[in-house]
Image: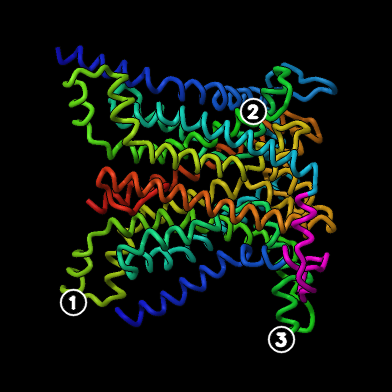
């Protein structure tokens, strides 16, 4: 009897989940598998030659241009993630520990609003803010602090980093905030009662307990930044491409779909590897917790 | 605790200024009569808003974007209801795997989703149009819809449904008369969030729309022409106001829903 009820429940659940599941199979899994298959084919003059080969992956790992773009993407994504998470932590901490409970939702709402406004326009405005006649440079020259516009923020990797750090800020704040909210406040009091200083309590109690949130934030920022297409295009004017731009150029302009697919697959593998490392770290922190 | 709190507060306010910097500049340049987007400002004008109003391509882009966003948000929310109901109410084999797979677009770089879909569409000879954009947007809105709807479904008291069965309602009747009204605020907030995501989505629209413009792709095409920028600033101002109104509405419905089933007002989309 119990067995039959379980079967009925399983059937009902599987029946309900099937429309979204089949939609994702058709629109997500099938295209991803196509890309995976294409990445092992060769680009002919007019059509794709159907002979399995690893050539595209050899190109991905040996071609100097690919290496430059790949390294740039990784470095930019790593710096953006580091900067975003470091800057976001105190904000999440403030909202969690110093804002009155009934006002927390309003603060979170305030933090997320900028994230919902046109991504393209925000990116473009950073170009305006950091540009040659931009807000930063005209203000600093006007105040007489500098006589020449600052060039280190001018349409280069630095401005890409600043723009992306802005774009993904709420993504970092929210998971850290949720982790901090879950911390039992009596643990902190216990730490203080046992004679730990405030800094040591933070270091030995709060921070380890907040780590799952920090790790989630790291992943949530890292994954979309490494695949960002818009920012290098708008800020760098196409002169400092990242991996997403290279995938697009190979798929469309150069019409080398096998190489484009190999680049896309490699990017996915990198993202998956980074995720696995961080999730493993997370598991260690969760174990310490118990 | 007081002094460290003050330092943190100052830092948080500075951080908010950083977050809002572009949005504060948007209306400033939208009403600035100078054609170059730089300081010092020239004078006050509403000309850019008038030009925006009279622009035929822009109107076409807006119509396309609205059709796409309305369709994608309805489709994503309908599919999301199935997934949220299945994952919160039923135990079945492979549940976490299937759910993880459906939520995958949330953590997959969008360029990969767009490019792989494009390769398949070109390969099968499907004509690119706003229809193909709707297909893509439904896929990427679905995880967000599920996230919002799962909160609504998981806070639902199951005994209410069982009471309806006991009183002789059919399964569908109980769902329609008891469950649906209770999760309605979640559904509305899922529709609004999916609508907002689709309206602002660029990558998929850029590659899958063929020759049809949408608002973000129109904006992108204009960013190259310095003369067109003031109008884009005006458009951006209107869009910012629109998103804030939509989000405030979504937040209002989410909280009302929580209050109705006795939940706390905190938490939310993430």
Q: Residues within 10 Å of mark 3 (few under 14, many from 20)?
A: few
Left or right for A226, reference B160: right
Q: Are marks 3 and 2 in contact (CB under 8 Å)?
A: no
**Secondary structure at numbered mark 2:** helix
Residue at left offset 34%, top offset 44%: B257
Q: Which residue is mark 2?
A: B117
* Residue under label 1: A195
Is residue B190 positioned above or below A124 on the image? above
Task: Please report the residue visible at 22 percent of the width from the left and 64 percent of the height from the top.
Answer: A185
**Can I make out residue A158 in this image?**
no
Among the 4 quarters of the image, the one containing residue A101: bottom left
- For marks 3 and 1 on the same chain, the one whose residue lies earlier in the sequence: 3
Q: Which residues are magenta?
A: B30-53
* Residue under label 3: A143
Question: Residue B191's spot in the image, x, y percent?
Answer: 49, 38
Q: Is residue A149 visible?
A: yes
Q: Position of residue B174 (x, y in %)?
A: 27, 23
Looking at the image, is A9 positioned above or below residue B260? above
**Separation of residues labelled 1 and 2 (CA atoms):** 59 Å
Characterize the magenta stretch by its predominant secondary structure: loop
Q: Nearer the viewer, residue B231 or A242?
A: B231
């Amino acid at each position: 009897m119990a067995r039959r009820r379980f079967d009925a429940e399983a059937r009902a659940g599987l029946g309900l989940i099937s429309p979204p599941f089949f939609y994702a199979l058709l629109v997500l899994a099938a295209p991803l598998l196509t890309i995976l298959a294409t990445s092992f084919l060769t680009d002919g003059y007019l059509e794709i030659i159907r002979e399995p080969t690893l050539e595209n992956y050899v190109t991905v790992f040996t071609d100097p241009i690919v290496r430059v773009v790949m390294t740039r993407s990784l470095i930019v994504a790593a710096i953006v993630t580091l900067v975003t998470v470091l800057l976001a932590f105190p904000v999440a901490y403030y909202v969690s520990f110093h804002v009155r409970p009934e006002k927390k939702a309003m603060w979170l709402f305030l933090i997320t609003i900028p994230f919902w406004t046109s991504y393209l326009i925000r990116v473009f405005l950073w170009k305006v803010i950091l540009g040659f006649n931009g807000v930063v440079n005209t203000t600093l020259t006007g105040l007489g602090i500098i006589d020449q516009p600052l060039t280190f923020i001018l349409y280069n990797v630095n401005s890409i980093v600043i723009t992306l750090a802005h774009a993904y800020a709420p993504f970092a704040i929210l998971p850290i905030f949720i982790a901090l909210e879950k911390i039992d406040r009596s643990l902190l009091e216990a730490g203080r009662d046992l004679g730990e200083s405030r800094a040591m309590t933070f270091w030995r109690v709060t921070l380890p307990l907040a780590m799952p949130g920090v790790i989630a934030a790291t992943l949530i920022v890292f994954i979309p930044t490494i695949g960002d297409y818009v920012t290098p295009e708008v800020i760098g004017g196409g002169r400092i491409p990242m991996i997403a731009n290279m995938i697009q150029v190979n798929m469309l302009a150069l019409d080398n779909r096998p190489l484009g697919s190999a680049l896309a697959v490699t990017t996915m593998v990198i993202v998956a590897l980074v995720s696995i490392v961080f999730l493993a770290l997370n598991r260690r922190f969760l174990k310490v917790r118990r | 605790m007081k002094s460290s709190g003050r330092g943190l507060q100052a830092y948080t306010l500075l951080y908010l200024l950083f977050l809002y910097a572009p949005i504060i500049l948007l209306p400033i340049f939208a009403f600035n009569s100078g054609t170059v987007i730089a300081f010092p400002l020239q004078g006050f004008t509403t000309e850019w808003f008038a030009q925006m109003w009279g622009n035929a391509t822009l109107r076409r882009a807006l119509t396309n974007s609205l059709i796409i966003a309305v369709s994608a948000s309805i489709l994503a929310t309908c599919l999301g209801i199935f997934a949220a109901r299945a994952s919160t109410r039923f135990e079945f084999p492979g549940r976490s795997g299937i759910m993880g797979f459906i939520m995958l677009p949330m953590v997959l770089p969008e360029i990969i989703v767009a490019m792989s879909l494009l390769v398949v569409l070109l390969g099968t000879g499907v004509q690119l149009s706003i229809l193909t954009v709707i297909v893509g947007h439904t896929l990427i809105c679905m995880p967000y819809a599920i996230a919002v709807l799962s909160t609504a479904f998981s806070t639902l008291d199951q005994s209410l449904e069982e009471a309806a069965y006991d009183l002789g309602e059919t399964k569908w009747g109980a769902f329609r008369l008891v469950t649906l009204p209770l999760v309605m605020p979640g559904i509305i907030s899922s529709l609004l969030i999916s609508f907002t995501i689709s309206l602002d989505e660029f990558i998929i629209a850029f590659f899958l729309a063929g020759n049809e413009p949408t608002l973000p792709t129109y904006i992108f095409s204009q960013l190259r022409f310095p003369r067109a920028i003031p109008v884009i600033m005006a458009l951006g101002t209107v869009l910012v106001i629109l998103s804030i109104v939509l989000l405030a509405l979504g937040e209002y419905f989410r909280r009302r829903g929580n209050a109705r089933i006795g939940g706390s007002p905190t938490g939310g989309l993430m």
